[in-house]
Amino acid sequence: MITRREVLQVGAAAGALLAGGGNLTRAFAQQKLTQDELLKFDALGNVTLLHVTDIHGQLMPVYFREPSVNIGVGDARGKPPHITGTDFLKRFGIAAKSAEAYALTSEDFAALAKTYGRIGGLDRLATVIKRVRAERGQDKVLLLDGGDTWQGSLGANRSLGQDMVDCMALLKPDAMTGHWEFTYGEARVKELIKRLEFPFLALNVRDTEWDEPVFPAYKMFEKGGVKIAVLGQAFPYQPVANPRWMIPNWSFGIREDDVRANVEKARKAGAQLVVLLSHNGFDVDRKLASRVSGIDVILTGHTHDAIPEAIKVGKTLLIASGSSGKFISRLDLDVQNGTIKNFHYKLIPLFADVISSDAEMSAAIAKARAPYADELKRVVGHADSLLYRRGNINGTFDDMICAALLKERDAEIVLSPGFRWGTSVLPGQPITVEDIHNATAITYPQVYRMPMTGERLKEVLEDVADNLFNPDPYYQQGGDMVRCGGLGYSIDVSKSIGQRISNMTHLKSGKPIDPKKEYVVAGWASVNQGTQGPPVWELVERYIAAEKSVRVTPNTSVKMTGV
Amino acid sequence: MNFNINRRQALTIGAGAMVAATAGFADIALADKKAADEAIAKFAGGKAPVAGKVKLDLPEIAENGNTVPMMVAVDSPMTAQSHVTEVLVLADGNPAPAVVKFHFSPASGVAEAATRIRLAKTQNIIAVAKMNDGSVFMGTKQVKVTIGGCGG
């Protein structure tokens, strides 16, 4: 592993090489940023909450481009997190081209990535957590993991979550909840939870037979003399958005009444601070906060939003800590007589070139990656343009996956899931096996090939669009729009289900999609049991290897209106 | 009210409420939303149902349209003077909108009942409660039945 000293030396050398170039250099970035400055925090009160969420199997620092298109509908329209690019910078008073601008937006991403480098890594995270615990005292700090931790990389998939469980254990979290964790199936989830030295909380999961709770709803802690109840809320639509057959005995849902009942129960049991560790998604939590009283803090997750301020809804503070291991949130609270008197909040981007690596975690990561080390770094091809995933309608990484499936499955149309995890590859960089798996590593990767009528295709698009753009967030599932290959369409986000999608076009022929005609459709991540086909990463690898250099041209086949 | 029904509580409710649950009434097995409205009008006996008092506990999005857990509860003291007599549950998008009718008496103690219902597509579930004084109350909840698979 590269230590901080080595990084600084590399930086200095690079600075010397690039001196007079006129551009920002890594050395410049490092002079502007120090670990002390990045972690500087005006400590306050008696409790510190540390929050990480949606790490998605990323043990190492990553490039991750935040979305440029993230539309809010209904009450969420124009409110964070539905602000992007320069509007985002303006709203939060962030200077263009600054380190924060790079971490939080898509503006000038490829250029700024070269300046500020990768972000994240559990070893950097460990450094920050240890430092905060040392500064504040262990008796004041709670570390909470919002889930989507055990999935999203080759190593996590091959070890069925083991690599993440082992490394996260070193951070000593106080509790977690989940979503993609459940895609390892009931037996494996139970097995892994048994080994955790902290509770897996999920008040909204019940068994399908007797409707009884499967997991503990909350845990009481005492920190800084304050009794704190941490309630866990797993992703409500697990059996709808991911395969139900993997967890046939468990039922989920938002279960607002159960949230309310548990908040009341915790208060009666003496809780002076009630924290909801949630995987609902930001808009769902915003609505929940407006309807359920008595929650002091919601640590949000699932929708991968990184918001540099706490958002207040009534008396509830909403925290959004991003994804992919890029950030950790620190929230200091002054809790007096059961209410928050004051708070300080900072969303800390874990700049890998600025924060030193923790030796213990670094060794654990190296050990976890060792079985696949050669495979992970194997170069398959090169990116000639930026590859990223996040965005409501499309991302260039998914455009590449669609192109790969069109070709490798000899299909007319491709449907690719609108997942929000998946790291970015910069122009000019090699595309490695690790990069491919960072965008595809799931336990149901089979690429199907089947006929679908134009009518059915429209139903699918309408269905997914409603999961994203239903004005009532309780009906949203938190993913992005299904990505289409070979298919263009128009979408009016202001309409209701059945009315949003129009002008569906078969791109190759330029002809309108015929509702009665059958098209050969390839796709992956089907929630149906027994789906047949090769794993998606195999086809993407074959495609990139044949292309050698991948250039994704801007996707103009989807027209959005009603924003 | 506690919706945390476990096996024992469910059995108690079943016995205490003397719930007569009948699925698929032959006489009101009607085919569309208009039919549902007509069934409500017939049940209400000419009175206009008032929104309120009736709470439907259903998921916002069904995990499996073939068996959707449903609970209905009516706010009532359930005394001889003031109690719920019947609750009709309809699914306005099902080929046969009438789902179930629950019968209550003061001996029921509480006016609540749970069952599982089948939903053909996204639709409104409507519960209409008739009181002993003839007044009628109504609650509605939309349940989405989706194709699923793109959450992330």
Image (cartoon, coloured by chain):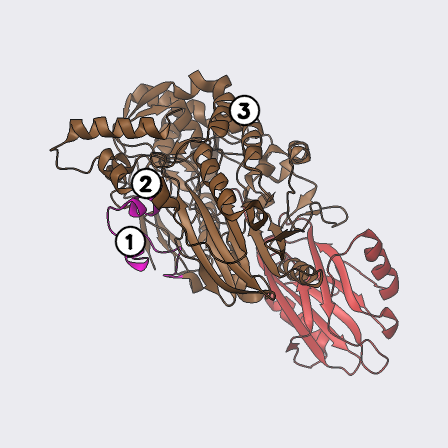
The mark closer to the camera, 3 or 2, is 2
Residue that label 1 marks: A94
Query: Where's residue A100, x and y in %?
Result: 31, 47
Which chain is in brown here? Answer: A
* C-alpha separation, residue under disc 3 versus residue under disc 2: 36 Å
Secondary structure beneath disc 3? helix
Output the chain of dot 3.
Answer: A
Name the kind of residue labelled 1 in the image.
Ile
10 Å crowding of disc 1: few (<14), some (14-19), many (20+): some
Secondary structure beneath disc 1? loop
Question: Quadrant of the image for the C terminus of chain A?
Answer: bottom left
Query: Where's residue A22, x and y in %?
Result: 12, 37
The disc placed on residue A163 is none
Write down the colour of chain B.
red
Against A271, residue A122 (above or below) is above
* C-alpha separation, residue under disc 2 versus residue under disc 1: 18 Å
* C-alpha separation, residue under disc 1 versus residue under disc 3: 40 Å
Instruction: Report if residue B28 is visible in the image.
Output: no
Q: Nearer the viewer, residue A270 or A562?
A: A270
Query: Where's residue A196, x and y in %?
Result: 64, 35
Residue that label 3 marks: A158
Q: Earlier in the sequence, mark 2 or mark 1?
A: 2
